Every structure is written in C-alpha cells, then in structure tokens.
Image (spheres, rainbow, N blue to C red):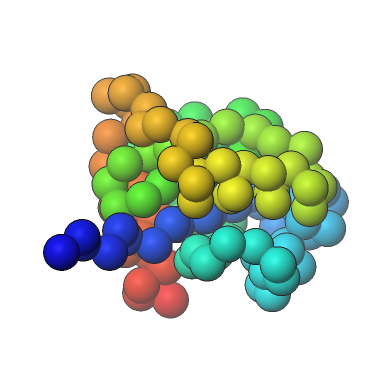
Amino acid sequence: MTATPEPLLVACLCAQWCGSCREYAPLFEAPSGLPPARFVWIDIEDHAEVLGDVDVENFPTLLIARGDALLFFGPVTPHAQTLRRLVEAAASGELKPLDDAALAGLPARVRALADAA
C-alpha cells in the first residue's frame, strides 16, 4: 500500500504595500486550474517571526513545500503562468528538495501560521 503524499504548500511571501503583490494576491485567494495544493498569502511585515533569519529581498517570493521538504524558494514574476508552471513541476515530482540549512523549518512555520489563521 502506497502512502498518500502530503499536499503541497504554496505560500506567497509579500507585503501589502507592494503593488505587484496586490495584483498577484487573487491567484492565491481563488486558485483555478492548478494542481491541488494549500495556497497561502503571508504579509512578511505583519508576520516577520515566520521568517526568522531568512531575508526576503524581492517581491513576490514564493515558497513551495511538501511536508517539511522545501521544493522552491525564491522571487518570481507575478504571472499566473509562472505560478502554474512551478506548482505543476512540484506536483509531478520534478522539483527536488532544497538542501539549505538557512531555510530549515520555514515550511513548518508557514504552515503553523496558516493553520492559526
């Protein structure tokens, strides 16, 4: 019997003042035609504790994880096609877990904040 994989977590780390982020937000509020995933929006200025020592220098920054395995973390162009391509790659297993000690624990902290909301 094969275990069902944990669902993808797709988080946009942004700031409310960022115009590009505000335009990107509807994709996370009502994702359409994307593989099943949990989509969350996190204003990093309101929830800086989630980042810990991780710096987000460009907006929007996207985090994609499955469980505690971080599959993608970085700035993206705020386009639906970019989001679709990354989520599909993660869902299909094309994206391999990142090995970055500085990002360890970030998916769990993002998930905990989303669960508390």
For the C terminus, the image quarter is bottom left
Return the x and y of residue 86 as percentages of the image width and height: 62, 42
Q: Quadrant of residue 58?
A: top right
Residue drawn where x is 36% and y is 32% of the image:
97
Return the x and y of residue 7 as percentages of the image width and height: 39, 62
Task: Please indicate, yes or no, whether residue 27 appears anywhere in the rendered image.
Answer: yes
Residue drawn where x is 30% and y is 52% of the image:
67
When the figure is inspected, residue 13 is found, relative to residue 113, above or below; the finding is above
Q: Is residue 60 left or right of residue 63?
A: right
When the figure is inspected, residue 90 is found, relative to residue 36, above or below; the finding is above
Seen as rendered, the residue at the extreme left is 1
Task: Please indicate, yes or no, whether residue 49 appears anywhere in the rendered image.
Answer: no
Residue drawn where x is 49% and y is 35% of the image:
94
When the figure is inspected, residue 81 is found, relative to residue 7, above or below; the finding is above
Return the x and y of residue 27 as percentages of the image width and height: 73, 64
Q: What number of labels is visible?
A: 0
Residue drawn where x is 40% and y is 31% of the image:
96
Return the x and y of residue 25 as percentages of the image width and height: 73, 62
Q: Is residue 94 left or right of residue 111?
A: right
Of residue 94 and residue 43, the one placed in the foreground of this image is 94
Seen as rendered, the residue at the extreme front is 1
Q: Is residue 30 left or right of residue 47?
A: right
Of residue 5 and residue 83, the one placed in the foreground of this image is 5
Q: Quadrant of residue 41?
A: bottom right
